[in-house]
Image (spheres, helix red, strand yellow):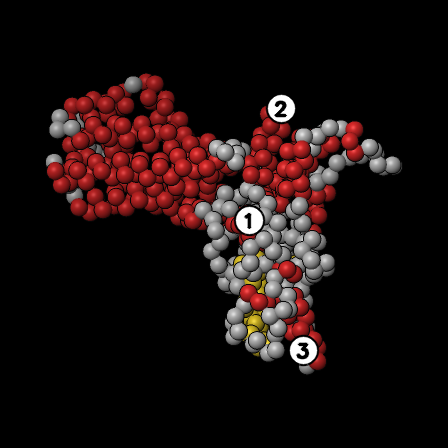
Amino acid sequence: MRRFFGSSVTKKLVMALAGLFLITFLIVHLTINLFLLSDDPDPFNKAAHFMASNPLIKIFEVVLMGGFLIHIICGVILQIQNWMARPKRYKVTYPSQTSFFSKYMIYLGIIILIFLFLHFMNFFFIKLGWVEGDHENFYGIAHDLFHMPQYLVIYLFSFLILAFHLNHAFQSAFQTLGLNHAKYTPVIKGIGLVYSIVVPVGYSIIPIVIYFFK
Amino acid sequence: MNITLKIWRQKNKQDKGKFVTYKLDGVSTEMTFLEMLDYLNEKLIKEDADPVAFDSDCREGICGMCGLYINGRPNGPEKGVTTCQLSMSVFKDGKKITVEPWRSKAFPVIKDLVVDRSTFDKLIQVGGYISANTGAAPEANSIPIKKEDVDRAFDSGICIGCGTCVAACKNASAMLFVSAKISQLSLLPQGRVEAKERVQAMVLKMDELGFGNCTNTGACEAECPKEISLSNIARMNREFYKAKIS
């Protein structure tokens, strides 16, 4: 299995690149989501329609799904190897000064994956025609969902978890790429911290505004 | 002072092992941790019991032979020290101290607190060296090297191969050790000659020996008695990518 998927360093590199790709995509997705705040459903629906019909975007979609799959597969393989590397655990453990969320990345990732499945059921699978729904009115679907308190709670919780995941992920990806520098690493860590707060907060504000004010 | 020790006892590799509790009186705060274990063993020998097996050699923090997991941390609560440099003065009277061996698939327990770290030797054997002709040592100043590079190579070269990084890492990864050895050699012109082969051979061997994968948590750096930096792992990654694409 190790031979097929390459060395540990290669798997980490692939995982980091896929992760950085997904990090970039989060900004694209957030930009489109901001159209949901408009009272006019047209801009969002047009953007969604463009995303569904443009051939270039369709290619990008395959790349994006590939990015998710590669990130998940590499993550799971690395995690299983890591568990196997310590078959007998310590009786007493004391938390050392480390990147806190790095210890829980796999669990945070699993929660995000569950949310992603729910998200696909509500939107992406409708677009593909796998699940019934009005694929010309994603604005309406999103607004209906965000008016359901239970969906709002799940959504906000998922983005809190994503924030924790990103908090470690951003700077970790750069370290894996071999980019560690006395002067620039603190800057990268700073950008990562800001990103892990701003982007999930950006996603979270939209349903809150819709629930309370729209 | 009086302390209660909870020590991992395991007869041999096959034995399942268990924790045994020992109450120890008359421990001096001036003892080192290993001297305290010597003191316990003298007591056990007098009682005709089996003394606790643990590794040590120089007892001055330079050989890398000792290494115990004390109260949930490799080498105990002090920063930047090996187990042999740990003083009993950091523990309070009446304190319960749990002592465990390094836990890793690649470091199987031989007896009690002694683990087999020959996997580190195997890593060195595949590339942790430079090939040079034997004979008289050449003139040291014949190859000019930047002071900055010498310092950085030295910072990596002070790794004593104790295995704290593997013990501390939640994934039992040896990447800090391997990267320190790779860095130490690749930063110097003598080591650059075989840099490409070295990094590939050592990374593949590290995977083969069953060490885990680094998740950039940083526990290794935080607990390393020689305070080896995580930047070594980034350098190892760079060296590995360079070797793969060139």
Asked whether B60 or A7 is in front, the reply is B60
Q: Is residue B231 visible?
A: yes
Q: Which residue is mark 2?
A: B246
Q: Amino acid at mark 1?
A: Cys
Q: Which residue is mark 3?
A: B43
Residue at disc 3, secondary structure: helix
> Residue at 53% of width from left, 43% of height from top?
B214
Q: Amino acid at mark 2?
A: Ser
Q: Position of residue A75 (x, y in %)?
A: 46, 41
Q: Chain of mark 2?
A: B
Q: Chain of mark 3?
A: B
Q: Position of residue A98 (x, y in %)?
A: 47, 49
In the image, taking residue A196 as reference, residue A149 lies left or right, namely left
- Number of numbered callouts drawn: 3
- Residue B220's tag is 1
**What separation in Å lies between label 1 and label 2 (alpha carbons)?**
30 Å
Q: Position of residue B126 (x, y in %)?
A: 71, 40
In the image, taking residue B219 as reference, residue B140 lies left or right, namely right
Relative vertical location of residue B69 with respect to residue A22 in this rendering, above or below: below
**What separation in Å lies between label 3 and label 2 (alpha carbons)?**
61 Å
Asked whether A81 or B88 is in front, the reply is B88
